[in-house]
Amino acid sequence: MKILVHSPSDAIAGGCESIHQLCDALSENFETYITYYHNSNSEIPKKFQIYNLTKSDYFDDFDTIHIFPETSVKYFYNKIEKGIKVIFWLSVDNYLGLKDYNLLFKVIRFFKTLKNNRISLNKLNNCHHLSQSEYSNLFLKKNKIIHYFIGDYINDNYINLNVDHVYKENIIVYNPRKGFNFTKKIINKSKFKFIPIKNMNNTEVIELMKKSKIYIDFGKFPGRDRIPREAVMLDNVIIIGKRGSGYNDVDFPINKNFKISVNKRAFVENVIEIIEYALNNYSSLITEFKTFKDQLINEKKYFKIRVKNSLKDLITKI
């Protein structure tokens, strides 16, 4: 069997990195290729050239396993005529078309996603399924869809770095693309020093998080987001919203005090209070994240084991 892993072209977001990590892991035990859709001439992004990847044009035959993300299910379901279809569930909300828009745009987005991405549950059962998060696991279980959990892992650039707490400053980092409608309320009502992750490469993000003490994120957490995990690796206290994968304690096993409901009337006041407490008690609080950090350090090893075992089992069922 040959495996063709499909990634959107010219994209380097966290989900795309998970796709390239999957291709890399599969290459250790199977004949595996990465291919790009939308622009088939795209080259492997520089960010992902650290992985063992072989690029290929699209092909389809009865001896091919196609792995593609959940946001392109309808496209590949119709395109693939001979090969085996495997959906890699990197998110739930993105598949459902759930975004932080006002009501009108939410309705428009929902129906646009329904038209472009989604297929019936009966058709989903004609595919095989890989899951990146507990959030995806719960969604698939709820819909009685058999799947394999494989996860993903943090880029090696963030592992085993020397983080000297002496140089930590009272800086709060945030991603302006994630839940900024909530974050800006906190920024406007407090006097803390906030720095956005904007127009930065990996090295610049690492240097920023080496200095910062807190990372906040009130986005939808459609999957097991990377930046909060990277922040933990760089000894940041993370304060997140009880949304999506941030809600459960498998994807983000952190103290419940650092998970805030964005729907509470006192949301802004609660977050400001927790930020102030975290800044004043950073040295003791950061130790509470050690178990999570140790888990993140070992994710790569277990990811590769799960990928190998899942695909071997899947092949026996084809």
Image: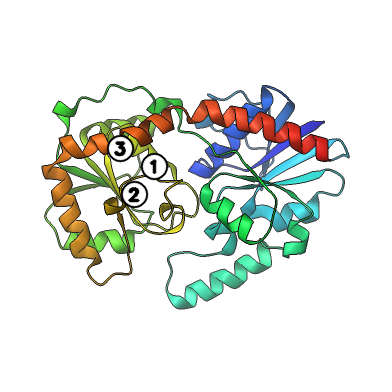
Residue at 45 percent across and 46 percent down: it is 251
**Cα gap from disc 1 to disc 3, whole angstroms:** 15 Å
Mark in front: 3 vs 2: 3
SS for callout 2: loop
**Cα gap from disc 3 to disc 2, whole angstroms:** 20 Å
Tell me residue 87's x, y (percent).
68, 48
Q: Are marks 3 and 2 in contact (CB under 8 Å)?
A: no
SS for callout 3: helix
For mark 2, what is the residue? 175
How many labels sit on residues? 3
Work out which quarter of the rendered image holds the N terminus and state it: top right
Q: Are marks 2 and 1 in contact (CB under 8 Å)?
A: yes
Tell me residue 192's x, y (percent).
14, 51
Left/right placement of residue 5 relative to residue 239 reads right
Tell me residue 72's x, y (percent).
66, 53
Q: Dot 2: within a 10 Å radius of its alpha carbon, few (fewer than 14), some, or many (20 or more) residues?
A: some
For mark 1, what is the residue? 227
Three-letter residue code for mark 1 = Ile
Rendered position, 171 above or below 45: below
Q: Earlier in the sequence, mark 1 or mark 3?
A: 1
Work out which quarter of the rendered image holds the C terminus and state it: top right
Three-letter residue code for mark 3 = Phe
For mark 3, what is the residue? 289
Q: Dot 3: within a 10 Å radius of its alpha carbon, few (fewer than 14), some, or many (20 or more) residues?
A: some
In front here: 49 or 292?
Answer: 292
